[in-house]
Image (cartoon, rainbow, N blue to C red):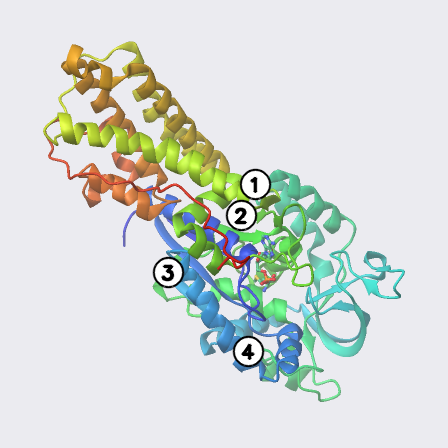
Amino acid sequence: MSGRQKFYITTAISYPNGSPHIGHAYEAIATDTIARFERLDGKDVYFLTGTDEHGLKMKQTAAREGLTPRELADRNAKRFREMAGTLGLSNDDFIRTTEPRHYEAAQEIWRRMEANGDIFLKAYAGWYSVRDEAFYNESETTLGDDGVRRGPQGTPVEWTEEETYFFRLSAYQDRLLAHYDANPDFILPPERRNEVTSFVRGGLEDLSISRTTLDWGVPVPESTTREQSGNGAQHVMYVWVDALTNYITGVGYPDQLNPLWRLWPANVHVIGKDILRFHAVYWPAFLMSAGLEIPQRVFSHGFVLSKGEKMSKSVGNVVDPFDLVKAYGREQVRYFFLREVNFGQDGNYSPEAIANRINADLANDLGNLAQRSLSMINKNCDARVPQPGEFTDADKAILAAADGMYAKAREAMDRQAVTRYLDAVWYVVAEANRYFAGEEPWAKKKTDPKRMETILYVTAEVVRQIAILALPVTPDAAGKLLDYLAQDHEARGFAALGEAGRLKPGTELPAPAGVFPRYVAPEVEGGDED
Ligand code: ME8
């Protein structure tokens, strides 16, 4: 077994009740970038994503489409897998909650919670939102002018009464609060902590965790129904009990001898702000009850909005991730979302904003800098890394900025501050452009060719470090830049950053080509944009 530090990271598992949308893509891109960053930093990374296939929402959508829930799940889970390919995700596994391995895990965690005395049968009556798959207290709902009662996220709720199994969530209030207190970084970003702690402080009610009116779910273990049979009804697990368990199924649970089990507890669950309560309250309580360790962190990101509005099919502003990648390119889409939408907060998508980012940050700033410096080397330095002369203050300053990028990026990524990490890298991109423009290597070609070589060496060295640090977000384009700098596989990890990996004068370089083309909007003919 390697002595490397392990790093287990997950996305939420998406409901495959439709095709993936841009919110799903955003979460996947961010999680992938974090996973790649940690891999390049030498960690033993495991990255899990997948689909959440049970529950009433799936059942109802399938019925509307004239399909069985399984047919609907099969069709759309395929689209989610395709999206992983289209976005270039580096996930190690893709879990579907309808797989036998997951039934086994969900039933085992249930049995352990029951063995701990936390599961009991009781009549339930309350408000339920199918869209959120969540119960709400009456006080969390409001009756609209249209006569429709809605939950806190604006989705309609319906009155539900049935005898179900309950989880003794009320018993975990103090332990949860103590856990948040002792682990101030359990919930990030910090703005999101308060909403969780005040919810828990307000008092936790026991949670209904099974359904008899639904058959599309993981069956409650027979041992439970034998001992607490109630009216003899068949129960399936409440979809969130089974969904959250995916994170341990994915690393081998209940087989604790599975080598993947070393990865538990997860380092980070990346999720959207709408499902924080499930991850920061219910999930740790289930794990405490089952005697399992609690994940180290729940990072709750914001929502991607379309020009300030929530994307919705009825408004007609839904952006399809496949179309977006086709129009702008995978690397461009990845960079855009992570730089533009401050990770942890809400942000906006618009065609103008993405075109701007592509042309300003990628094509002009990084692309041109690399292309201009590398093609000058190709033409004027015999296509070899030039031999630098003595460094001036300006050379030293830009090299120091490049050498300092890793520490800044690392500090940001210790808290999954993806946007801050990219800001730190692109700050150096901008500085390097100022350096290059100010030093005018093209003007030195005739007057001081030695100085030109030094400037080109320094610029290429800065581009090298930028490219390594850009690998997590734009893996293909940054990889090409490193090809043009003749950097082999071992020279592409973070261990090669700083002085350790300095370009070696005399190294032969291949002819460079542009890696970030400018975005030019296609001519609109006859109003048809496709
Ligand atoms: O909630 N912007 O699935 P889901 C950013 N199955 N993120 C968004 C978003 C948007 N516009 N819309 C949704 C579920 N998301 C459950 C999860 S985990 C054990 C079970 C995010 O398909 C959302 O916040 O509704 C969530 O993290 C993920 O996409 C999947 O949402």
Compared to 96, does 352 lie above or below? above
Of marks 3 and 4, the one in the foreground: 4
Which quadrant contains ligand 1? Answer: bottom right
Name the residue beneath numbered marker 3: 92
Q: How far from the left and from the top, in percent, is residue 76?
A: 51, 72
| Residue density around tag 4, few if under 14, some if 14–19, many if 20 or more, within 10 Å | many
**Label 3 residue SS:** loop
Q: Which mark is residue 81?
A: none
Secondary structure of residue under mark 4: helix
**Left-right relation of 350 to 447:** right
Residue 162 in the image: x percent, y percent? 78, 79
Ligand 1 within 8 Å of disc 3? The answer is no
Q: Of the residues under marks 3 and 4, which one precedes in the sequence?
A: 4
- Front disc: 2 or 3: 3
User: Which residue is the site of mark 1?
Assistant: 185
Checking the image for residue 297, the label placed there is 2
Q: Earlier in the sequence, mark 1 or mark 2?
A: 1
For discs 1 and 3, the disc positioned in front in the rendered view = 3
Q: Amino acid at mark 4?
A: Leu
Q: Earlier in the sequence, mark 1 or mark 3?
A: 3
Q: Nearer the viewer, residue 447 or 117?
A: 447
Q: CA distance from mark 1 to mark 2?
A: 7 Å
Point out the tag, 2 or 3, that comes first from the N-terminus.
Answer: 3
Please name the residue that numbered disc 4 is placed on.
Answer: 72
How crowded pointer 1 is (Cα within 10 Å; few <14, some 14-19, many 20+) is rated as some
- The type of residue carrying mark 3 is Asp
